[in-house]
Image (cartoon, helix red, strand yellow):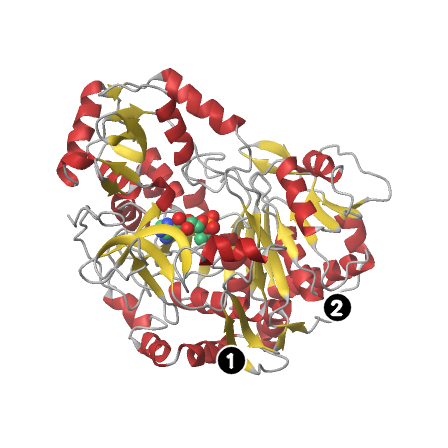
């Protein structure tokens, strides 16, 4: 245990290590330290070399990186087009028949889309947008389910230089309206609805409600997906298929500046107005192509890559659409939920398409743990060779479960840390190089500067603190749309000269980085600052536990006391003894200081739409009630309260 004054203390010690399997390393894109060495010697030169190798440019840059803290310019003066890089160049190189996406709808309908098909559709929709008066620089809002028309719309925007702003299809009409208003978008692309767990989610009615508050919207383009009756406003609303039927299949890509806006993506807070995160063109494409190639060890000719996120999140922007397509990869896209029609839908998809790389989130992995390992065991998952994780700290036990039950013990697991703001993965293993430790995102990638600092901004060589980025990176956000001061305040004011990510992290004896969750969630028990992640990992370490969320509740003696919400595996039963056992288990794994005062069993934890546990809501519940000193056995009113507040809260809550 480290000293008392540490920013965040360091309790858990995970000793298991997994070096790259011999066969994996021998075939890997990189299996030595050459990329790290090149980047350490000259990080700007390193990024310039990656930009030349991975991206096609119409005109070269005059400088690699201009840094006027906190405003960066990457590849100044260079010209390129993202849709050209994702499509035309592969078709010109004779790869037009390669599959870009194996798409599967939730009801079971399927489409196979080649690079030639995609180029054709993208050109047509680019012409449709032009026909609707969309010009270079105009913002286009997109509110769609996971159907092929979504990447088509994105790439069409990129082709004509109109930045897109995608709003996740699960968001409410108010969330959509707020984002359209902030971006002053002129066209909205949506669908009648989408399939979710066997029922139709109505997108068009939400779009209509939003547009009533958005005078900037001139046209709404509607994809027919589910076929239910929808209202169409005369003169404003147009069917996708009507417009596409008459559109030409040639559309010259715009020559965009490296720093032209590629897209806006809004991140929300619980209270504040969502921030329009700005991502631009040349640096972004360079870094996501680089990370997609090396973090996933991509072999474009043979891999079938599945990032199971929704394109409405940054993960989908960077690692379903732009990164994989820039690299000429073959991807899988799935519309629906993992439990429709049955809880083995994902394993069925992996078996059907012979998926070799799977990229998903800890929340999904813990759900599959809860459902049981018999489900993946029923399927042939032998095509998998690499697994990835993103979105939250992955508890060591979930990592090991994923490695064994999905990866058959043979696939490296890359735990990738990044944010909407970073645009690209920044901290992650390179699977042919790095010895893995379950639960650690390991090291900053080549070219990335990251460090852990204490309350005063001094570098922490070992122990816990705040994660900072020490230099600009090509895919970094360029600001918050329309609010440069908020950009500076939010990210660049806490520690001088550094980007503060809002996350706690610790460094171990070997220099590995371990993410500890958002610093706002850190608990203070008798003066010890304890990360939620470590206590949750200790709980998930118990064989009966599938998932856990811990929060601090006011306590007259200790300042804050730890309250644990626990979901057991499907085969386990909650009992008072079980609660006692879990409290003791945490005390033995971490130390008596971290023993939860209260354990509450619940079937589900409240989560954001992107799958992150809503600890603040749980903390409100814990603080609003006097919870006893022991196990609160499946207290139905607590669970009810969590549920009602999770569903009644703003759909925007993040
Ligand atoms: C926050 C960013 C990055 C795409 C999806 C989420 C947490 C993300 C990890 C990881 C620990 C992680 C952080 C980060 N996070 N990846 N591998 N280990 N924490 O994007 O919604 O902008 O969220 O997600 O707290 O700050 P986002």
The secondary element bearing badge 1 is classed as: helix
Residue drawn at point x = 31 percent, y = 34 percent = 548
Above/below status of 456 relative to 294: above
Above/below status of 118 relative to 107: below
Residue 60 location, x and y as percent? 59, 82
Residue 434 located left or right of residue 471 = left
Residue drawn at point x = 70 percent, y = 53 percent = 140
Residue 529 location, x and y as percent? 25, 42
Residue drawn at point x = 35 percent, y = 25 percent = 622
Return the mark for residue 251: 2
Which residue is the site of mark 1?
Answer: 52
Disc 1 and disc 2: Cα gap in Å?
25 Å
Q: Is residue 92 visible?
A: yes
The secondary element bearing badge 2 is classed as: loop
Residue extending furthest toward the right: 235
Give 38 or 368, whichever is nearer the viewer.
38
Q: Is residue 112 visible?
A: no
Residue 355 located left or right of residue 635 = right
Label 1 or label 2, whichever comes before in sequence order? 1
Cβ of mark 1 under 8 Å from ligand 1: the answer is: no
Residue 161 located left or right of residue 610 = right
Return the mark for residue 274: none
Q: Residues within 10 Å of mark 1 (few under 14, many from 20)?
A: few
Residue 240 location, x and y as percent? 75, 49
């Amino acid at each position: 245990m480290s000293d008392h004054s540490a920013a965040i203390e360091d309790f858990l010690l995970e000793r298991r290590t997994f070096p790259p399997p011999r066969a994996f390393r021998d075939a890997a894109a990189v299996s030595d330290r050459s990329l790290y060495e090149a980047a350490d010697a000259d990080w700007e030169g390193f990024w310039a070399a990656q930009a030349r190798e991975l991206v096609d440019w119409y005109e070269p840059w005059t400088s690699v990186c201009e840094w006027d803290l906190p405003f960066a310019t990457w590849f100044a003066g260079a010209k390129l087009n993202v849709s050209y890089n994702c499509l035309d160049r592969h078709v010109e190189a004779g790869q037009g028949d390669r599959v870009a996406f194996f798409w599967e709808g939730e009801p079971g309908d399927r489409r196979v889309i080649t690079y030639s098909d995609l180029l054709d559709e993208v050109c047509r929709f680019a012409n449709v947008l032009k026909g609707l008066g969309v010009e270079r620089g105009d913002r286009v809002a997109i509110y769609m389910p996971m159907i092929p028309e979504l990447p088509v719309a994105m790439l069409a925007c990129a082709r004509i230089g109109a930045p897109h702003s995608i709003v996740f299809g699960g968001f409410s009409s108010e969330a959509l309206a707020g984002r359209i208003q902030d971006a002053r978008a002129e066209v909205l692309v949506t669908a009648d609805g989408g399939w979710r767990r066997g029922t139709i989610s109505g997108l068009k009615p939400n779009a209509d409600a939003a547009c009533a508050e958005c005078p900037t919207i001139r046209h709404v383009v509607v994809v027919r997906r589910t076929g239910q009756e929808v209202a169409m406003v005369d003169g404003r609303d147009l069917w996708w298929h009507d417009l596409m039927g008459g559109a030409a299949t040639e559309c010259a890509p715009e020559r965009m500046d490296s720093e032209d806006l590629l897209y806006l993506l809004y991140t929300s807070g619980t209270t504040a107005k969502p921030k329009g995160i700005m991502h631009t063109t040349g640096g972004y494409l360079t870094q996501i192509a680089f990370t997609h190639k090396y973090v996933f060890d991509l072999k474009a000719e043979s891999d079938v890559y599945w990032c199971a996120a929704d394109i409405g999140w940054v993960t989908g922007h960077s690692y379903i659409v732009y990164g994989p397509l820039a690299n000429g990869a073959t991807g899988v896209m799935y519309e629906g939920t993992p439990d429709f029609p049955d809880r083995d839908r994902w394993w069925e998809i992996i078996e059907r398409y012979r998926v070799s790389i799977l990229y998903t989130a800890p929340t999904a992995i813990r759900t599959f743990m809860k459902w049981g390992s018999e489900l993946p065991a029923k399927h042939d998952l032998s095509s998998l060779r690499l697994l990835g994780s993103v979105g939250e700290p992955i508890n060591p036990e979930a990592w090991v479960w994923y490695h064994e039950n999905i990866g058959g013990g043979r696939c490296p697991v890359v735990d990738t840390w990044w944010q909407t703001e970073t645009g690209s993965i920044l901290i992650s293993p390179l699977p042919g190089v790095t010895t893995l430790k379950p639960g650690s995102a390991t090291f900053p990638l080549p070219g990335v500067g990251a460090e852990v600092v204490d309350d005063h901004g001094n570098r922490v060589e070992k122990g816990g603190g705040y994660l900072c980025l020490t230099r600009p990176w090509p895919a970094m956000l360029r600001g918050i749309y329309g609010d440069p001061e908020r950009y500076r305040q939010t990210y660049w004011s806490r520690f001088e000269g550094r980007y503060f990510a809002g996350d706690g992290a610790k460094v171990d004896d070997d220099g590995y980085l371990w993410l500890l969750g958002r610093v706002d969630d850190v608990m203070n028990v008798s003066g010890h600052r304890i990360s939620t992640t470590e206590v949750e990992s200790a709980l998930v370490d118990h064989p009966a536990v599938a998932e856990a969320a811990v929060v601090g509740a006011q306590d007259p003696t200790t300042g804050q006391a730890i309250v644990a919400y626990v979901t057991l595996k499907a085969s386990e039963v909650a009992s008072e003894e079980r609660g006692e056992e879990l409290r003791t288990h945490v005390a033995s794994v971490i130390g008596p200081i971290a023993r939860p005062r209260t354990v509450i069993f619940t079937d589900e934890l409240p989560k954001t739409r992107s799958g992150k546990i809503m600890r603040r809501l749980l903390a409100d519940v814990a603080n609003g009630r006097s919870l006893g000193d022991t196990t609160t056995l499946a207290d139905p009113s607590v669970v009810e309260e969590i549920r009602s507040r999770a569903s009644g809260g703003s759909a925007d809550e993040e």
